[in-house]
Amino acid sequence: NKQLMIKNKLIQNASSGTYHYLPSMTRSMNKLVQIIDKEMKNIGAQKIIMPCLAPKRLWEKTDRWKTMGSELFKVVDRNGAEHCLSPTHEEAVTSIVASDSPISYKRLPIKLYQIGKKFRDEMRPKHGLLRGREFDMKDLYTFDCTLEDAQRTFDEVCSAYSNIFTWLDVPFVTVEASTGAMGGTKSSEFHLLSEVGEDILYRCDSKDDGGNKTVNNNVRCTQNGCPGVMHKRAGIELAHAFVLDTKYSNAFKAKFIDASGNKRCLVMGCYGIGVSRLLASTIEMNSTKDKLRYCSLLAPYQICIIPQKEGYKSDVTWGMSESLYDRLTDTTNLHDEVVIDDRLHMSIGQRLNQAVASGYPYIVALGKKVAIFPTTLE
Amino acid sequence: NKQLMIKNKLIQNASSGTYHYLPSMTRSMNKLVQIIDKEMKNIGAQKIIMPCLAPKRLWEKTDRWKTMGSELFKVVDRNGAEHCLSPTHEEAVTSIVASDSPISYKRLPIKLYQIGKKFRDEMRPKHGLLRGREFDMKDLYTFDCTLEDAQRTFDEVCSAYSNIFTWLDVPFVTVEASTGAMGGTKSSEFHLLSEVGEDILYRCDSKDDGGNKTVNNNVRCTQNGCPGVMHKRAGIELAHAFVLDTKYSNAFKAKFIDASGNKRCLVMGCYGIGVSRLLASTIEMNSTKDKLRYCSLLAPYQICIIPQKEGYKSDVTWGMSESLYDRLTDTTNLHDEVVIDDRLHMSIGQRLNQAVASGYPYIVALGKKVAIFPTTLE
C-alpha cells in the first residue's frame, strides 16, 4: 500500500476557531511533537496525559474558576456538576504532585509535561491556527526546592526552547514580560516578529537580543549604558516561561521535605509552547502566496514521485515509480517519507505544478526523461 | 539525563470518570498508538485530527443532537452558540469528505482515522479506564463506491484489528452485533472475555470462533448443522466495526462520480478501538493482585538497573550502572528503554521488590554480585 494523496489542503475550518488537520498537516504536527519530545527528554522531563475536563472544585482552589472570566469554557454534566475545558493545567498537575506530598528533596526537580488539546473561549478567533478556541499546547510544569533552583530550571528550559526553535529555523526573539494573572516572579516570552502578530513588543534599535512588553516606544533602552531607543514591533507569541513560585503549591499543599527535615512548599515553574500556532507560523513564514514551503524537518513527506499520465507506455513509468518507491523506503531512512502521485488521469505538468505548490522538498517526475526537482526554501 | 522514576502509579483519578495518565502509563499508551498507526498504515489509512468541540448544526444534520440523549456533553460558548464534546466523529469526517465532493471513483476507497480524546457523559463511570467520561479512541472512517466494496474494506479492517490484538497477545473473540443507533447494515465487535465485562455475549459450546449478542442462552447454535448450544459469557468490548451504508453520506451529500459519470452517495464504514480501555484491559489481564505485568510490547521500559544503597562502595555500582545504561542505550535498540532506580536511600531488596511489582521485563541488580532477573509473564 502506497500513501495516496487525498487532497492538498492542510486544514479545514470546522467551526469558529476550530479546525480539522488533514493528513499532511497531521504528519507535520507529529514531526513537531517528536522534536519537542526529544528536547523534553534531554532536560529529564517526563510525559503525562491530563484530562481536558476539570472539575470546578479544582479551579476554585486557586480562585481561577472566577478570575479566568468568560474565556473559560464551562460544561455541566448530567448530575448538574460543573467542569471546565482546561485552558492550562497548573491546578491539575499540582494536585497530582500534592497527592505524593511531601516529597523528599532528593527526588527534585520533578518535570512533567504533556502535549494536547487546550480550550479557550476566544472573543474573536482569527488567523486560523494562530488564535483558535481549541488548540494544541505543550505544557511543562516543574517543581524545585528553592527559587534559586527554579531559576536554574528556568534557564535550562529556555535553552531547550531555543534548541527547538533553532531546529525549526524560526528566527525568534525573547522578551521579558509581566507575570499577570498567572502569578509568579519571572516571565519570558518567545516571539516570532511578524506583521500579523497581535502582541506589541519593544525592541532596542542598537542591539538584537530581546526586548520587552512594558517599556514604551521611543524610550531609552533600559540596559546600563546602552545608547539605543526602544521601537515598537508586532510579534506572535510562540512560547512562554514562568517562575511561578509557590502560588499553586501553596493552594494544593504540594510540599517537599528539605535536608533538615522541614516541610516546605514546592517552588514551581510553568512553560508553554503553542504547538499548533508554532506549526502554522513556520509554514506561514516559509511559504509564498502560491507555494507552500516547510522547514525540512516538518515537511509532511520528503519526496513525491510523479509517473506518466495513463495511456501510451504509462505502465512503464508506473513500474519504475513503484520500484523507486520500494528502494527508497526499504534501503534508506526515507521509510514512510515517499509518496506516489497516482492521479494518472492528470498530466505530469499539472501534477508537477501541484507538487511544487504543495511544498515537497524533492520531486521526481518520470516522463520521457526523469527529472528531479529539489524545491529548496528561497 | 537518565529517566528517573517519580512514582510507580499508572493512573490517578482526576474526577468521576476522568484520569491522569502518569509517566509509565503515558509511555505504554504511546507504544500502543504506534502499533495501531502501523496497522492503519498497512491498510492505507491516513491519520487526521478532528476537534473535540463540534457545533450543534453539524449534529442536527443527522438528528443525533437529539437522539444521542443525555450521554452527549453540551457546551454553550460566550456567544450563546451550542457545541458538543464529540463522542464520535461520523458527522465531522463526512463533512470533510463532502467538502471535496463529488470525488472520482478512481480515488476510492478513502480511509481516514484519528487517535484522540472522546467524551461521553456516562451515568455510572466505573472500572477505571474501562468506562470513563473522557477516554481515548482510535476511530477510522472509510468511503467506498458500493456495499460490496465496503464489505471488502470491512474484512480488511477486521483483519488489521486481529493483527493488533495478536501483537498484544489479547485472546479476543469476535461477535455479530446489531447496528443499533449507529445505523448501517453490518456490525462486528471484538471482545475480551472477562468477568468484569459489561456486555453479555452468547458463545457456542462446541466451537471456539465467535458468538453474538442477540441469540438467547441455552438456544441451539444458529450455524447449519452445528450441534452446540449457546452459553452466556461476559465480555469487554475492545473494538467495533460497522458498515454504515449511506446514512451519513446522504445527510451531508458526500458523493462520488462513478465510471458512467453518475453522482452517487459514498458507502461508509466506521471502525473504533477503545484505546485506553484496551490498554487497561491488557494490563488487567496480565497482572496479579501484587504484580503489574505488561505484554512486552507495551511495557513502559524494558530494563531497570538497581545500584547499591548509598554508603560503603556504592559509588562503584553507581558507576557500573551508568556505564551499563550508556552501553545499552547507545549500542542496542533499547535506546530510551532503560531506567536507573536512583533512590539510593533505599536498599537493593526494597527496590528489587518494587521493580518486580512494577512489571519491568528485565531487572539488573548491582550489589556484591550482579543478578539479572527476567520477570516473564506467568
Image: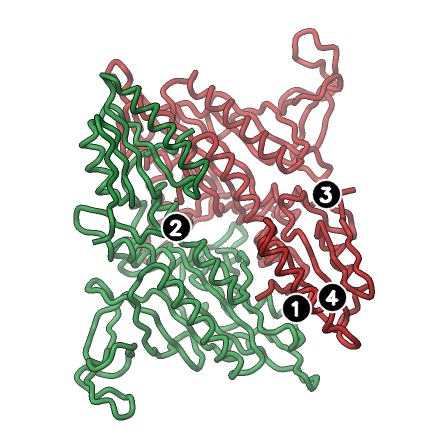
Chain colours: A green, B red
Instruction: Verify CB contact (< 8 Å) between mark 3 and mark 2.
Output: no
At x 72% / y 13%, what residue is drawn?
B220
Judged left or right of residue B219, residue B327 is left
Q: Position of residue A332 (x, y in %)?
A: 43, 41
Is the residue at mark 3 from the same chain as the one at mark 4?
A: yes
Instruction: Verify CB contact (< 8 Å) between mark 1 and mark 3.
Output: no
At x 67% / y 30%, what residue is drawn?
B200
The answer to whether residue A171 of the structure is visible from this angle is yes
At x 60% / y 62%, what residue is drawn?
B3
Viewer-proximal residue among B18 and B362: B362
Name the amino acid type tagged 1. Answer: Asp
Viewer-proximal residue among B2 and B107: B2
Q: Place residue A168 in its image quadrant.
A: bottom left
Q: Is residue A49 above or below residue A91?
A: above
Q: Identify the residue under disc 1.
A: A100
Mark whose residue sits in front, 1 or 2: 2
Q: Is residue B355 above or below residue B344?
A: above
Q: Position of residue A261 (x, y in %)?
A: 70, 84
Is the residue at mark 3 from the same chain as the one at mark 2?
A: no
Q: Identify the residue under disc 3.
A: B286
* Mark found first going from the N terminus, 1 or 2: 2
Q: Residues within 10 Å of mark 1 (few under 14, many from 20)?
A: few
Q: Place residue B141 in its image quadrant.
A: top left
Name the amino acid type tagged 4. Answer: Pro
Name the amino acid type tagged 3. Answer: Asn
